[in-house]
Amino acid sequence: MQDEPTPTELIKAVADFFRNEIAAEIKGHNAFKLRVGINALDLVTRQLALEQGSDAAEAARLKQLLGMDGALIELNRALCEKIARGEVDLQTPGLAEHLWQTTLDKLAVDQPNYASYKRELGKP
Amino acid sequence: MIEDQLGRCVAFWYPGASGVTGAAKLSGGASQETWTFDIVHPGGNVGAILRRAPPGYGASPGRAAGLDAEATLMQLAHDAGLPSPRVMHVLKPEDELGAGFIMQRIEGETIARKILRDEQFAKARPILARQLGRVIAGIHGLPAGKSLRLREMTATKEIADLEREYRSFNWPRPVFELALRWLRERDPGPSKEVTLVHGDFRHGNLIIGPDGVRAVLDWELAHFGDPMEDLGWICVNSWRFGEIDKPVGGFGTREELFAGYEEAGRKVDPTRVMFWEVMGTLRWGIMCCGMMQRFRSGPDHSMERAMIGRRSSETEIDLLRLLAPRGK
């Protein structure tokens, strides 16, 4: 068993240091790169917090949709094949809902400030 | 050192020029660079831009039109009275600067967030969509001959290219599969009219001033094809930068864009434009995945590229909003 602090706590501490102490002192292109770096660290903390839950729910939906079991990536490959062959489409019960939920869960990690995502969540 | 080379080059074709100053690289990967500099002249310095493949990088990759074609197209646009920089000089081997060209530098802004938010563009924003419609119509009417040897694209070829690239990533994306299927089922076939298509007409490639559009840049993806492609591409949500209710670049409506286009004597096919908007959304998503691949395997191991890979999910939500909108 690994000891504390957790990866999330460590990354947050580093990101906060960059954000609160360093960002104001950096100018030009490196200031832009620093912002990208802070965004990357924030993304990682969101993924660490959310991934387990969303992956489990996605796998459960896929098992239901496909009637098969397997690793998440294999289930996704199987769904891709079925869509490509036209065996499932937006008329298939549950497919649109599944794709929406999966995509919203990705945005929650990748870009929670993306305007389309906020609109779909009903936020202003 | 590049200032010495540029100075020697400029002296050959700019009467009275005594050298260059202030050379700075604006952007560049290994194979293509953009430099800004001033030509020193007794009558006042003249702003210029160098776009080049450095010596040793001759051929242009994959889809690129090539720097010679870019120079020709830019000059054609300029001569037709479209907002375009004047091409001052096409590089020759004896310039020892590689392949490319030198053009007039046009002052203005290319950064979308500034164009969409800064006060100095407040008067430009309401007129831009219509203006750009007219400019796109002008581009589609340019007398670009087959001697330019640009790619000829159709919707069918574009779908196949996107699918091949997506499959090469070997990473399952059900929303992209849905979009590919949607596009194949609605492929409108070859366009009745084939014109010059800019291919990347969007924020970043447009210089905007307080008075509106001043220049169209970056003809790298120019080709012959369906003119509706350019109208669809500028409506892709990725170029709205948060202003999602203004489909044209975050500043205007489709109606304004189409009105400008038709004012210039051309016809819009809104169904085809929407088809190309879906294609464009998928295309940007696949380009984001491609950046991630180059981050992994290529020499450019940068955070920026890595993080762009995580923007492909933005195009997935936009594709779902287009193809499977939820009940409002």
Image: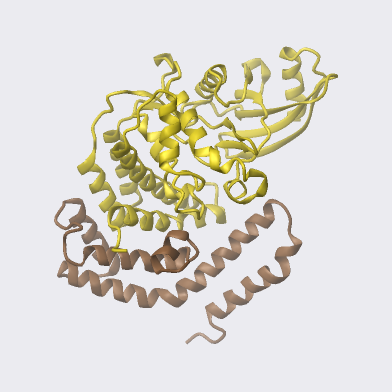
Q: Position of residue B241 (x, y in %)?
A: 51, 52
Quarter-wise, where is residue A51 in the image? Answer: bottom left
List x then y, in percent, for residue B90.
Answer: 61, 18
Q: Quadrant of residue B280?
A: top left
B18 relative position to A66: left or right: right
The answer to whether residue B43 is visible is yes
| Picture coordinates of residue B191, whole percent (x, y) | 28, 28
The colour style of the image is: by chain
Along the line of sight, which residue is nearer the eye, B270 or B127?
B127
Chain drawn brown in the picture? A
Answer whether residue A69 is visible to the viewer in this image.
no
Give the color of chain B as drawn. yellow
B222 displayed left or right of B26: left
Q: Residue at x 67, y 18 (%)?
A: B95
Asked if A85 appears above or below B55 in the picture, the reply is: below
Indicate whether B72 appears above or below B310: above
Number of marks: 0
Q: On the rendered structure, is A35 left or right of A121?
A: right
Q: Residue at x 62, y 16 (%)?
A: B92
The picture places residue B47, in percent across and down from the top left corner, at 73, 28
